[in-house]
Amino acid sequence: MSVGGSAEVVDRRTDEEGSLVEGLDAVLFDLDGVIYRGPELVPGADDAVGRLRAAGKQALFVTNNAARTPDAVAAHLTEIGVRAVGSDVVTSAQAAAKLLASRVAPGSKVLVAGSAHLREEVTANGLQVVAAAAEEPVAAVQGYTPDLTMAQLAEVAYAVQDGALWVATNTDPTRPTESGLAPGAGTMVDAVATTLPGRFPEVAGKPEPALLAETLERVGSDRAVFVGDRLDTDIAGAHSVSIPGVLVLTGSHGKADLVAAPPAQRPAQVIADLGGLFAPAREAVGDHHRVQVNAVTAVIDGDTVTLDGPLEGTAEQLDALWALLSLVWARTDAGLPVPDTDRMLAGLDQIH
């Protein structure tokens, strides 16, 4: 749901009474910043996944990473305390291979510039892997691998210039490492795109719909939510397949990013950690001047906004954040002046 141009603020709940996950068949999770941060478990993630499964709900893990196999991702999850098997993990390499198989004839030649996992998935989908444009592939797919060479990128460019369908697993500009951020798959896509003015690949990973559509097909239901820590990939990806996106504040994006979020990147709910999945959904009620969430009210007074109500605990501060966001988004969408929220956000010091 979204706030439109009318004077009434629309409720942004996931349309369920009780907890956010009541009535759902599955919860889909992004990984880095949601389940783990690098090699470390995000506190409480193991308990949340266990509680979901105990309630009979599926928990699937969705990643734009096209280098690691599902079994490798599952082994990492299990090692840090979140039980998983390969079939619980969906990668952008799998989504890209499915996308290719839907677009070209069975047995077609596909130039693959990427990991062994990507090559295996292309083969598993009934296509023939080749390494050079001279072999006349009908499609070219590229994905991240640490040993990708400029020569391989050149072959992708040659194939696309010769008319091959161009697909990328994802376009993430960076990837996290223990030493800091490193160039991601998107930088390699950009390198090829620079040689092909006006051309850009079809993308399988978030925020495009193929990866999450593949995941929903696997769970056999669209009664799901997607939980992520980024607005531009995770929440936008949820919008692309018309399921609620829940932003968890344990990773990349926080309250300041939310204020400026365009409609296609606004979450259905915001939670401090994955335990919030088992709390009631927050309901925003009001208009462009005053919005109430539980006992907290956000009110416009001239060119400033004030928050009235209890703000001591994390739950109350999340109420205040949701009231503030609902008010700001409603005014933004209606073309009304938006007040400076920096001071209010700074006061919500128990959430980042």
Image (cartoon, grey):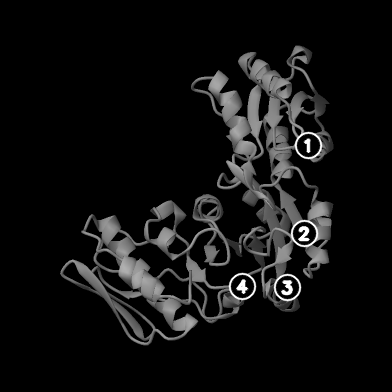
Q: Dot 3 corresponds to which residue?
A: 46
* Lower sequence index among marks 3 and 4: 3
Identify residue type, mark 3: Asp
Classify mark 2: helix, strand or loop. Answer: helix
Identify residue type, mark 2: Asp
Residue at the left extreme, as displayed: 302
Residue 351 circle label: none
The reply to whether residue 10 is in sight is no
Classify mark 3: helix, strand or loop. Answer: helix
Q: Residues within 10 Å of mark 2 (few under 14, many from 20)?
A: many
319 displayed left or right of 306: right
Q: Residues within 10 Å of mark 3 (few under 14, many from 20)?
A: some
Q: Nearer the viewer, residue 316 or 350?
A: 350
Q: Quadrant of residue 286?
A: bottom left
Identify residue type, mark 1: Ser
* CB-based contact (under 8 Å), mark 4 and mark 2: no
Mark closer to the observer (2, 1): 1
Residue 216 to residue 300: above or below: above
Mark closer to the observer (2, 3): 3
* CB-based contact (under 8 Å), mark 2 and mark 1: no
Residue 189 to residue 290: above or below: above
Alpha carbons under labels 4 and 2: distance apart: 18 Å
Q: Dot 4 corresponds to which residue?
A: 274
Q: Dot 2 corresponds to which residue?
A: 88
Q: Dot 1 corresponds to which residue?
A: 115
Q: Quadrant of residue 275?
A: bottom right
The reply to whether residue 87 is in sight is yes
Q: Nearer the viewer, residue 125 or 299?
A: 299
* Lower sequence index among marks 4 and 1: 1
